[in-house]
Image (cartoon, rainbow, N blue to C red):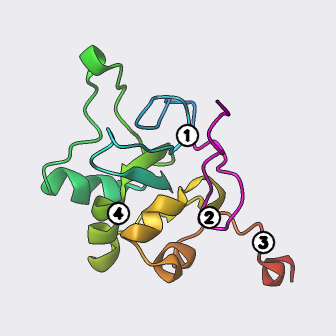
Amino acid sequence: MSEPAPERNVLGGVLQPCGTEPLTGFFRDASCRTGPEDLGSHTVCTVVSQEFLAMQRELGNDLTTPRPEYGFPGLRPGDRWCVVAVRWLQAYRAGAAAGVVLAATNERALDIVPLAALRQHAVDVPDDPSSLD
């Protein structure tokens, strides 16, 4: 039996790691990999902002309070974190979207979030030659 193909990012390349400090990902492997057990689709690699974290708390998704029982240190602005695609989309629609690391955002996020929305908030633009100007 062969190994499964590596997961792809929204740019069509191999999915890159999202963050290790704190260790992110549904599988806590630094990657926004997903699978059938990831019901929330933790597929958008973000660089969280204070505004994004405050909005998530208002929605009942507290990402700032440490939860040591789950190995979760609590997030601070600037941390990279794999967030649930629908939560990112809610923040985007409310004008509070976090920055997105496209190379580390799973292509499965595109099932929920339009690529154009992700690109508007990209903090990495590796395949965009206009960024070299």
Magenta span covers which residues? 1-18
The first of marks 3 and 4 along the sequence is: 4
Residue that mark 2 sits on: 123
CB contact under 8 Å: marks 3 and 2: no
SS class, disc 2: loop
The first of marks 2 and 1 along the sequence is: 1
Q: Find the distance from the CA under tag 4 to the CA under tag 1.
A: 17 Å
Q: Can residue 2 be seen here?
A: yes
Q: Nearer the viewer, mark 2 or mark 4?
A: 4
Q: Find the distance from the CA under tag 3 to the CA under tag 4.
A: 22 Å
Q: Nearer the viewer, mark 4 or mark 1?
A: 1
Residue that mark 4 sits on: 88
Under mark 2, the amino acid is Val
Position in image of residue 30 (x %, y %): 55, 34
Under mark 3, the amino acid is Asp
The first of marks 4 and 1 along the sequence is: 1
Q: Quadrant of residue 6?
A: top right
Residue in front for this viewpoint, 98 or 82 = 82
Q: Residue at x 35, y 63 (%)?
A: 88
Q: Residues within 10 Å of mark 4 (few under 14, many from 20)?
A: many
The first of marks 3 and 1 along the sequence is: 1
Which of the numbered marks, if any, corresponds to residue 31?
1
Q: Can residue 51 be seen here?
A: no
Q: Quadrant of residue 70?
A: top left
Position in image of residue 11 (x %, y %): 66, 68
Q: Nearer the viewer, mark 2 or mark 1?
A: 1
Q: Residues within 10 Å of mark 2 (few under 14, many from 20)?
A: some
Q: Residues within 10 Å of mark 3 (few under 14, many from 20)?
A: few
Under mark 4, the amino acid is Trp
Q: Find the distance from the CA under tag 3 to the CA under tag 1.
A: 20 Å
Which of the numbered marks, if any, corresponds to residue 127?
3
